[in-house]
């Protein structure tokens, strides 16, 4: 309903702007056009959002959400820690570790 009112305000503003004899009336008409167009766009957006929104009845209550959180299993324990890294000196064979570049 609001979008139709804004559309009527916009059309009235255009009519007023085109038929105006004084600058003040022209300014008022242009102001009505500006307000009407912006209001019309916001009304269209609001209707679009309302059409795609989920109704309140289908939303879960706070108690239901809390019960779902309690049901959830605790996170699994971390796996066994990785084996410690082997020092570089032990990776080389006995003769390679002592070589100089």
Image (cartoon, grey):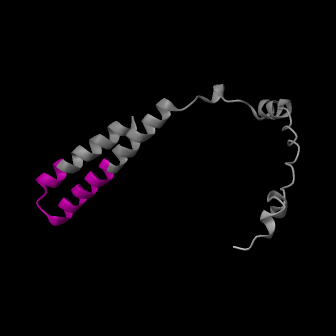
Q: What is the residue that sits farthest to the top in this orientation?
A: 58
Q: Quadrant of residue 72?
A: top right
Q: Residue at x 57, y 30 (%)?
A: 54
* Magenta-span inclusion, residue 35: yes
Question: Residue 93: x percent and y percent?
Answer: 81, 58
The secondary structure that dominates the magenta segment is helix
> Vertical placement of 76 versus 19: above or below?
above
> Vertical placement of 30 versus 80: above or below?
below
Q: Seen in the image, is 48 located left or right of residue 30?
A: right
Q: Residue at x 63, y 30 (%)?
A: 56
Question: Residue 3: x percent and y percent?
Answer: 36, 38
Q: Residue at x 85, y 48 (%)?
A: 82
Q: Quadrant of residue 74?
A: top right
Q: Residue at x 87, y 54 (%)?
A: 84
Location of the N terminus by quadrant is: top left
> Vertical placement of 53 versus 39: above or below?
above
Closer-to-camera residue (64/85): 85
Location of the C terminus by quadrant is: bottom right
Which residues, given as a range, are shown in magenta?
Answer: 15-37
Numbered-mark total: 0
Q: What is the residue that sits farthest to the bottom in this orientation?
A: 100
Question: Residue 36: x percent and y percent?
Answer: 31, 48
Q: Seen in the image, is 62 located left or right of residue 70?
A: left
Closer-to-camera residue (28/79): 79
């Amino acid at each position: 309903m609001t979008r139709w009112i804004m559309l009527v305000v916009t059309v009235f503003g255009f009519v007023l702007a085109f038929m105006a004899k004084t600058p003040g009336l022209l300014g008022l008409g242009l102001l009505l056009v500006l307000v009407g167009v912006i209001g019309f766009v916001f009304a269209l957006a609001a209707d679009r959002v309302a059409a795609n929104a989920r109704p309140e009845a289908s939303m879960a209550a706070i108690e239901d959400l809390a019960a779902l959180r309690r049901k959830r299993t605790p996170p699994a324990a971390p796996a066994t820690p990785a084996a410690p890294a082997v020092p570089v000196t032990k990776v080389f064979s006995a003769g390679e570790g002592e070589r100089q570049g």
